[in-house]
Image (cartoon, rainbow, N blue to C red):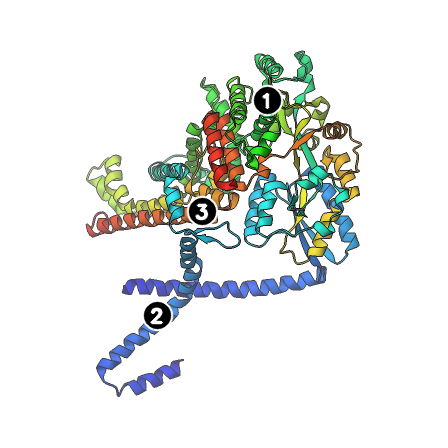
Amino acid sequence: MKRLLTILTILSVILLAACGLNGGGSTSESSSGKAEDSKSNEGKKVLEFWHIDPGEKEKIYEEAVARFEEKHPDVDVKVLRIPNDAFKQKLSVAMSGNEAPDVFSNWGGGWLKNFVDQGKVLELTESTDKAHFNELALANTTFDDKVYGLPLGLSIDVVFYNKEIFEKYGLTPPKTYDEWLSVIDTLKDNNIIPIALANQTKWPGAYLFMNFASRIAGPELFDSAFNRKGRGFDDPAYVQAGEYLQEMVEREAFNPGFNGVPYDEGQGRQLLYSGQAAMMDMTISFVNNVRQEAPEFEEKLDFFLFPTVEGGKGDQTQVGAATGPVWSVAKNSKYPDLATELAIELTSAETAQNYMDRTGSLSGIKDVKPADEFTKRFYEVVQGATHLQMPYDQTLPPELAELHKDTTQAIYGLDMTPEEAAEKMEAKAKEVLE
Amino acid sequence: METTEVKVTNTRSIVNVASRTKQNKFKSALTIGLFVAPALIVYSIYVIYPILTTLMYSFYDWDGMGAGVFIGLQNYIDLFKDAIFWKALTNNTWVVLTSVFVQIPLGLIMALMLFAPIKGIRFFSSIYFFPFLMSTVAIGMLWVLMFDPINGMINQFINLFGFENVAWLSQTNTALFAVLLVIVWQFAPFYMILFKAAIVGIPEDLYEAAEIDGANPLTKFFRITLPLLMPTIVSSSILAIVGSLKAFDIFYIMTGGGPNHGTELLGTYMFKQAFINFNMGYASAIAFVMFIVALFVTIIIQVMDYYRKKRGAYV
């Protein structure tokens, strides 16, 4: 006991000394820091702005920020870019600690709604000009007729392919699943990886699953399962979608070890650039990646829409789509009006035009038409679309979304049968949605 | 301060001896208390208080924001029925076993090699230590590239011996092994340094005496080096075990707990529940179980060490 007390005493003395030193040091530092701050940005209001996009998109945001700062010389916008997968976590942590950035990027849907339900997001209904936006895109950020985000970007997912490889082996873009399988077999015979997949982060593989489900049972399936109107996540169509995936895995349609390859780091895209792989089902943001990472690859790049399946109710006018970036304003922002204005500048016609023309992306702004060749073709797909399917993991509540991605990854890994996955999904859906 | 103390003693000199010792006791308790207070306050605020709040949150169904609903032990009931939790606990056990039975012996061997009469050993001592100096994030990303299923260095290496490519991080049965390999690579040097310091502290004359008695190197190791290293081995084991139970970063970076929870740890599962699924109450229950497990294991080791010392063995 005595010894313990002695030790504790010694420790506390050391700690006290350390505290004293640290305390003294930091106060003098911070006071000098403040002095410098006030000299350089004399009482400027600081807005924090987080987004996830590299390359040209980042430049466009920075230009929009510059325009905003010009209008408001007293405001300093701190722009922070965080890579996609890390961003979701970082923002969640910041939100729960009430330290969210004033303006932040998101994808609308269930993920945003979760923060809205917790009262962390500022309502923008009154400051939003609804006619300025594409209805389908804005609907994805509107909950109970209240707008919580402004969609700058709209993206669809298509199957990209390497034209050169297709020409070399006399292949044409498949229209049906059976044609797709024969393309896959031909490529396989010629030692080319048919489809590149980087599925460590689980969402890239989910696209195929969602597309299959939509092709088999039509887009009503998900809405019915999500809104608990008759059908469920254990619907035979979901089981069948899983079976299609496993059939492709067993045919070795994907690069080996895809479940351990992360998407952001680019090993999956590298397979496509280097000609080792021929196809990839991905959102059109891939074009932006190509322009930044391998500009010479663009001339070989082309795309087709997800093939139909035999006897399926869906067709090729039903497209998988997503809104993003969507700009939302945090409720705890010190300057909500300025932050809102920044979000509006980030979705202005000028920003949207640049966004479309320079990044090969679509925008959620109504009257802006693309000049870029690739984008024009995406634009036409959207114009001709009869249904836009938002990704499940951005529509479902987080817990169910995570389970959807986990089970889909397990289906790919042949660790779980499609029936098991469907049962798990439905059990969780009953718990979370009902 | 001093002057008042003198006064106090002066007045006290008239009082009888019994109350004097009592007062003395009180005074020393006060002194000790004052000295202990700063550390105790900091410790309470940053360690004890969070542990208690974690325990409290674990009784709630709470999403991390807003108000929670009190649900008693429901989180724990769900947790013990949760297959992923047991999977994570098993994986944590594997990390503990690897750390104690691979990492520490390897560190010891590396430390012994540094004392062997090999040319250029100082150079190797620096090389061995490099992995420990690198940040975990860099190590994780580096090894993800090395483990790449198609173009990775490891696969090209095993190709030389005629093996097929292995998708290390993509299969539930190899992913854990692959990450454990990285952990050993990263932390063995740390134990090497600990053992190196301890070996330096062993008196040279013991070896000289052993040599005169005609002991061979193996006897010298088992009769002198190993026994005298025992305290270091014990403290290394505590570090390794507690560190392994809390393991998170390298797994999070390399596999994110996947595929299909094959490398899920209590730490990564807690993080997912807290910040992806927003089940703060459930995550708190996991955190509290982690705390209990770590506490329990540490107590066992301490007790074992106490009896070892009591027997007077080695020390």
| Residue picked out by circle 2 | B32
Q: Amino acid at mark 3?
A: Ala
> Given contact means CB atoms under 8 Å apart, are the residues at marks 2 and 1 in contact?
no
Q: Nearer the viewer, mark 2 or mark 1?
A: 1
Q: Nearer the viewer, residue A80 or A4?
A: A80
Is residue A97 depicted above or below A8 in this figure?
Answer: above
Q: Is residue B130 visible?
A: no
Q: Position of residue B35 (x, y in %)?
A: 38, 69
Name the residue that disc number 3 marks: B283
Chain for numbered disc 2: B
Residue drawn at 42 percent across, 66 percent down? B38
Q: Position of residue B240 (x, y in %)?
A: 37, 44
Q: Amino acid at mark 1?
A: Ile
Residues at discs 2 and 3 both on one chain: yes
Residue A261 occupies quadrant: top right
Name the residue nearer the viewer: A161 or A10.
Answer: A161
Do dots 1 and 3 share one subunit? no
In the image, residue A235 sits, relative to residue B303, either above or below, namely above
* Residue annotated with mark 1: A195
Q: Are marks 2 and 3 in contact (CB under 8 Å)?
A: no
Determine the residue positioned at 56% across, 30% down.
Answer: A206
Using the rendered view, name the quadrant where residue A73 is placed: bottom right
Element on which disc 1 rests:
strand
Tell me if A208 is positioned left or right of B308 in this view.
Answer: right
Check disc 2 and give the amino acid type. Ile
Q: Chain of mark 3?
A: B
Classify mark 2: helix, strand or loop: helix
User: Which mark is in front, 2 or 3?
Assistant: 3
